[in-house]
């Protein structure tokens, strides 16, 4: 019995390892998987066959790898779009959702704009409706493995309770558990900037970088995530990374970063009341009136001081900017980089670089989906067999 249990655990670990490689690194030849894992060729072949049997992986012969009768050709394995996660992001001005497959591929997006901050109950109702809409658009053979929620607030790493989302007005909210009960779909939740850091580390600007800080700017303020030696810095309770509460100098003394570097002020300068990330970025770049340029420059200088503090304190290789912070960098790059260089300590600044997030508006969707993919990546066969055996697809509606 002990031997059988050990063999099952080893098999599960190998399946997890190979699927995670394909998820994070993209298509791989069997020979490359053999080299990276240290497993033998036949073992890799068996793993690929098992993953293909539940629809998670498929193989193909890429150009130059087709069988030619000489040597041992190696087909290329890649994840399929069968396992799907739904990602949700409740914000101050909208609730957004997307369907995401393994490999960080966003299939569908939907957004419900709001006239006022959303309450927990309203967010639950809207989220259930968006989930149902996305499920209706999925292919017939898709397997929904879970929901991941990126929320702008302090989320306990112990029990998933949203302890405080000040801009939304949420406190001690069991949003994830409530949404799971409402939809019948397993739901996980985390701070939005923390999942953004994770997404950029796996799929974006931070690929291959073990020490980075991600700063996200959204309708609900500024947050961040920290990776040190490839591991997330969470703090005792999971609250690390609230850079928006960092004090920065102002003409009146000092203020919180997110009270001075504000998305709402950029919208006001553009005569907008609301905008998604793509629209705001485009308008900042294209509608560069004197008022807009002045506001961008003001915010860029303050943001640069905060970035310099981060570099001096944490010594990251990269500082990745997402949301409207990436738009500030794009529209005032010289201001940001010159002020950072002038303010940061010389030695950590010598190896640091400030870059925009590569995943753009999909960043939080991809990061939130990672929460939902944890189960299938950890135990691929059991998760797919369990979810595939459901008699009917969850409706996502109360």
Image (tube, rainbow, N blue to C red):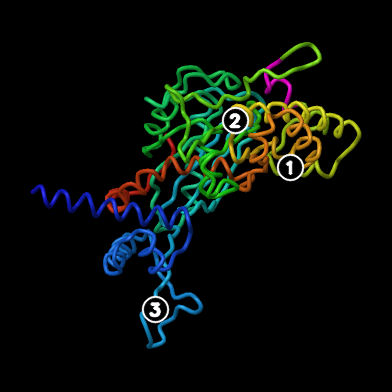
Q: Residue furthest front?
A: 347
Residue 34 position within the rendered picture, expressed as x and y whole percent measured from the top left? 35, 65
Residue 146 position within the rendered picture, expressed as x and y whole percent measured from the top left? 40, 42
First along the sequence among labels 2 and 3:
3
Report, in whole angstroms, how far the alpha carbon at label 3 lies from the one at label 1. Answer: 48 Å
Task: Tell me where the magenta segment starts and ends, as one range.
Answer: 255-264
Disc 2 element: loop
Question: Residue 358, labelled with which disc?
Answer: none
First along the sequence among labels 2 and 1:
2
Disc 3 element: loop
Q: Nearer the viewer, residue 317 or 384?
A: 317
Identify the image quadrant of the C terminus: top left
Q: Residue at x 11, y 51 (%)?
A: 3
Residue ID for mark 3:
73
In the depicted structure, whether residue 41 falls above or below residue 337:
below
Of the residues tagged 3 and 1, which is closer to the observer? 3
First along the sequence among labels 3 and 1:
3
Residue ID for mark 1:
279
């Amino acid at each position: 019995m002990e031997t059988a249990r050990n063999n099952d655990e080893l098999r599960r670990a190998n399946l997890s390892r190979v699927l995670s490689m394909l998820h994070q690194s993209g298509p791989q030849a069997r020979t490359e998987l053999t080299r990276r894992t240290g497993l033998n060729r036949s073992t890799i072949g068996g793993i690929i066959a098992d993953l293909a049997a539940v629809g998670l992986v498929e193989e193909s012969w890429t150009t130059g790898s087709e069988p030619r009768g000489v040597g041992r050709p190696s087909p290329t394995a890649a994840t399929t779009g069968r396992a799907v996660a739904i990602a949700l992001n409740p914000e101050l001005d909208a609730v957004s959702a997307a369907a995401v497959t393994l490999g960080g591929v966003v299939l569908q997006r939907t957004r419900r704009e709001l006239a006022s901050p959303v309450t927990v109950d309203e967010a639950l109702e809207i989220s259930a409706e968006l989930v149902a809409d996305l499920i209706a658009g999925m292919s017939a053979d898709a397997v929904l493995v879970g929901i991941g929620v990126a929320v702008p607030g302090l989320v306990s790493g112990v029990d998933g309770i949203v302890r405080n989302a000040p801009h939304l007005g949420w406190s001690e909210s069991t949003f994830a558990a409530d949404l799971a009960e409402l939809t019948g779909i397993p739901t996980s939740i985390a701070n939005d900037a923390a999942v953004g850091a994770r997404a950029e580390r796996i799929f974006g600007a931070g690929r291959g970088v073990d020490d980075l800080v991600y700063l996200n700017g959204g309708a609900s303020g500024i947050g961040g995530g920290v990776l040190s030696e490839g591991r997330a810095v969470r703090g005792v309770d999971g609250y690390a990374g609230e850079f928006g509460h960092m004090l920065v100098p102002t003409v009146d003394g000092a203020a919180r970063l997110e009270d001075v570097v504000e998305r709402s002020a950029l919208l006001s300068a553009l005569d907008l009341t609301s905008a998604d990330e793509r629209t705001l970025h485009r308008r900042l770049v294209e509608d560069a009136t004197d008022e807009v340029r002045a506001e961008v420059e003001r915010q860029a200088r303050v943001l640069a001081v905060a970035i310099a503090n981060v570099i001096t304190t944490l010594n990251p290789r990269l500082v990745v900017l997402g949301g409207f912070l990436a738009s500030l960098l794009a529209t005032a790059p010289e201001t940001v980089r010159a002020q950072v260089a002038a303010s940061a300590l010389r030695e950590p600044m010598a190896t640091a670089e400030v870059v925009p997030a590569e995943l753009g508006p999909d960043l939080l969707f991809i990061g939130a989906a990672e929460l939902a993919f944890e189960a299938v990546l950890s135990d691929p066969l059991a998760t797919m067999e369990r979810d595939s055996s459901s008699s009917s697809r969850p409706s996502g509606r109360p």
